[in-house]
Amino acid sequence: MDDNETLRTIKNRRAIRDYDTSKDVPDELVYKVIEAGGYAPSAENQQPWRIIIVRDKQLQEFIGQKAVDRTIELFGRATPREELERRLSYIESKASLERTIDILITGARFEYIKGKPETNGAPVLLVLAVDQTHIGNSQATLRGTGGVYGWSSPRHAVIAGSMMMQNMALAAASLGLGSCVSSVQLDHFDDVGAISEKLNIPFPHWVPILCLTLGYALYERTLGPPRQTPEEIAFLNKWGESFKGGRK
Ligand SMILES: Cc1cc2nc3c(=O)[nH]c(=O)nc-3n(C[C@H](O)[C@H](O)[C@H](O)COP(=O)(O)O)c2cc1C
């Protein structure tokens, strides 16, 4: 069976880290992307998400620098080189492998978040924050079965936020935009606090969990890192039982 348009969009969406800085993303498109995000499912339809659209270059720089610093910490200092080589062993060309390791250990891989033309930065950075108050107060009128206080949990909010993020990345791809989900600058408690403060996010009730850069890709990228097949991912009925998906 051939893939339809939706499946092709899903498969062709790539993490874009080099943007054509001569092209801005109009607010109309940002609106469409966020609107599609809002159609993601959420427990009890709590819609426990808020997005900060960061266009301010100083704020982008601040958030991007956190990503660069944390990457140097994680990949440059905390991960042995053999481990980096093992993880990137799918890269066949020695030169590409060396280049990839280099941009990881120097943090250069995350310069794109800063939005600077010199480093092909993204014009728009979306920061997704999710409601962690436990009672769920982000959508007072659209609660489902949860009654006055709602039954959604902080974990549900993170899950729903992740689904929203995927909706936005796919919507962006369908509109011809490149995007990249990033979390490295929000993986450490100190960074989450500092970024929340800068963006006036009422942390810790609301917690930024992911960012999404948006812009036009500088290079076309359809080939992504390798994916596991359904045979590798799925079991039939019980763990360990193979699923062949209609194949012999
Ligand atoms: C939860 C999550 C966190 C991620 N964090 C980062 C990140 O901090 N920086 C980055 O450049 N890419 C990040 N990515 C993008 C992944 O590296 C990318 O999606 C993955 O390598 C697969 O490549 P593809 O999206 O091109 O198919 C993240 C993706 C997800 C879902």
Image: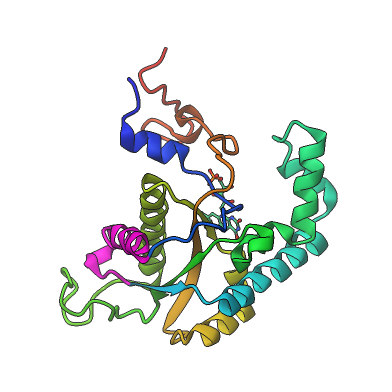
- What kind of colouring is applied to the model shown? rainbow
The image position of residue 106, as x and y in percent, is 79, 60
**Is 61 placed left or right of 12 in the picture?**
right
**Is 34 placed left or right of 104 in the picture?**
left
20 up-or-down from 138: above or below: above
Which residue lies at the image location 78% right of the left edge and 49% below the top edge?
Answer: 101
30 up-or-down from 8: above or below: below
State the image quarter where residue 224 is shown: top right
**Is 116 placed left or right of 79 in the picture?**
left
199 up-or-down from 218: above or below: below
Q: Specify whether residue 161 is painted magenta.
A: no
Residue bounds of the magenta highlight:
27-48
Q: Specify whether residue 35 is painted magenta.
A: yes
Q: Residue furthest front?
A: 22
State the image quarter where residue 75 is shown: bottom right
Q: Which of 166 and 229 lies nearest the eye of the viewer?
A: 166
Dominant secondary structure, magenta: helix
The image position of residue 18, as x and y in percent, is 61, 52
Q: In which quadrant of the rendered image does the C terminus lie?
A: top left
Q: Which of 134 and 15 lies nearest the eye of the viewer?
A: 15
Residue 32 visible in the displayed image:
yes
Q: In which quadrant of the rendered image does the N terminus lie?
A: top left
The image position of residue 183, as x and y in percent, is 56, 64
Which residue lies at the image location 34% right of the left edge and 22% below the top edge?
Answer: 2
Q: Residue furthest top?
A: 248
Which residue lies at the image location 63% right of the left edge and 57% below the top edge?
Answer: 120
State the image quarter where residue 147 is shown: bottom left
The image position of residue 42, as x and y in percent, is 28, 62
Residue 84 visible in the displayed image:
no
